[in-house]
């Protein structure tokens, strides 16, 4: 076929159409994945926050013990 000649016959491309049930199933699965990802992200952020606070408290206690000759038992009373 020459570059200047265009095809003028019937359209031979197929466009499969989805049923309403298939669309609903795809949308439901996408929503489930979105909720799962959001939940995982929230738990990761909460865990990260808790770990940071624990490390901060350990650092404060260690600094108090080293600089102030304070025993850990006194700090935890």
Image (cartoon, helix red, strand yellow):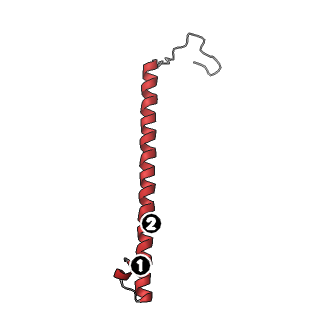
**Vertical side of 56 occupied by 18: above or below:** above
Q: Position of residue 46 (x, y in %)?
A: 44, 56
User: Camera-side residue: 3 or 32?
Assistant: 32
User: Camera-side residue: 1 or 35?
Assistant: 35
Q: Considering the numbered disc 2 on the image, is that residue within a helix, a strand or a loop?
A: helix
Q: Where the C terminus falls, by quadrant?
A: bottom left
Residue furthest toward the right? 4
User: Camera-side residue: 18 or 49?
Assistant: 49
Mark with earlier residue (1, 2): 2
**Residue beneath disc 1:** 61
Q: Residue at x 50, y 18 (%)?
A: 15
Q: Position of residue 48 (x, y in %)?
A: 43, 60
Count every numbered label the image shows and give the total: 2
User: Camera-side residue: 76 or 69?
Assistant: 76
Q: Residue at x 43, y 22 (%)?
A: 22
**Vertical side of 51 occupied by 24: above or below:** above
Q: CA distance from mark 1 to mark 2?
A: 14 Å
Q: Position of residue 21 (x, y in %)?
A: 43, 20
**Residue beneath disc 2:** 52
Residue furthest toward the bottom? 69
Mark 2 is surrounded, within 10 Å at the Cα level, by few (under 14), some (14 to 19) or many (20 or more) other residues, namely few
């Amino acid at each position: 076929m020459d570059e200047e000649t265009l095809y003028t016959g019937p359209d031979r491309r197929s466009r499969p159409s989805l049923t309403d049930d298939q669309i609903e199933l795809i949308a439901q699965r996408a929503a489930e994945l979105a909720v799962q990802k959001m939940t995982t992200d929230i738990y990761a952020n909460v865990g990260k926050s808790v770990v940071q606070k624990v490390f901060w408290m350990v650092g404060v206690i260690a600094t108090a013990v080293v600089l102030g000759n304070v025993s850990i038992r006194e700090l935890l009373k």
